[in-house]
């Protein structure tokens, strides 16, 4: 059976629990493609100097046509990795994307894994970033 891989396509990954804002290094780069029966996402957000609201349980939506309707506890259906980077201090933490039962992806960090807030893992500031690379099987 041939493997079908589509080109990367940008999409509007609606941020939930944060806003990138504008100014400075502000960036929202969100893209996806189909790889056989899987969906592959690469999303990068860099917080700007104006209008940014920093992460409170950061989550984001999935591309149209790649929905998830399964329970969030079925972890074998999603794999992923990511990073949280402080633009000012250079601190870097690994990030862990998890599928929620409401059908979006939440970003966690740490060991043990915990949620992100405006003050953890540091006090977020303009120039800080979140990146995730996720693969999952849509419903």
Image: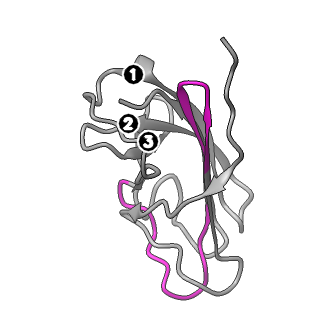
Residue 57 image point, x, y percent: 36, 54
Front-lying residue, 58 or 41: 41
> Which element carries disc 1, helix, strand or loop?
helix
Identify the mark nearer the N-term, 2 or 1: 1
Can you see residue 15? yes
Residue occupying the far right of the picture:
90
Q: CA distance from mark 3 to mark 1?
A: 17 Å
**What's the mark number on residue 66?**
3
Residue 126 versus residue 73 in the image, above or below: below
Check if mark 2's residue and mark 1's residue have beta carbons within 8 Å. Answer: yes
Front-lying residue, 64 or 46: 64
Identify the mark nearer the N-term, 3 or 2: 3
> Which element carries disc 3, helix, strand or loop?
loop
Identify the mark nearer the N-term, 3 or 1: 3
Q: The magenta stretch spans which residues?
A: 32-57
The residue positioned 42% from the left and 67% from the top of the image is 18
Q: Quadrant of the C terminus?
A: top left
Q: CA distance from mark 2 to mark 1?
A: 8 Å
**Dot in front, 3 or 1:** 3
Would you say 70 lies left or right of 130 here? left
Which residue position is annotated with label 1? 75
Which residue position is annotated with label 2? 99
The residue positioned 71% from the left and 77% from the top of the image is 25
């Amino acid at each position: 059976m041939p493997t079908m891989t589509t080109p990367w396509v940008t999409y509007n990954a609606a941020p939930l629990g944060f806003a990138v804002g504008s100014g400075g290094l502000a960036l929202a780069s969100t893209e996806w493609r189909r790889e056989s029966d899987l969906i592959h996402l690469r999303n990068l957000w860099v917080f700007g100097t104006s209008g940014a609201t920093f992460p409170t349980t950061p989550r984001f939506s999935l591309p149209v046509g790649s929905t998830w309707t399964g329970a969030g506890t079925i972890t074998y259906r999603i794999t992923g990795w990511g990073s949280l980077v402080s633009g000012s201090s250079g601190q870097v933490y690994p990030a862990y994307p998890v599928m929620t039962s409401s059908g979006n992806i939440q970003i966690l960090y740490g060991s043990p894994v915990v949620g992100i807030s405006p003050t953890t893992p540091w006090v977020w500031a303009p120039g800080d970033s979140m990146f995730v690379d996720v693969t999952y099987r849509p419903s």
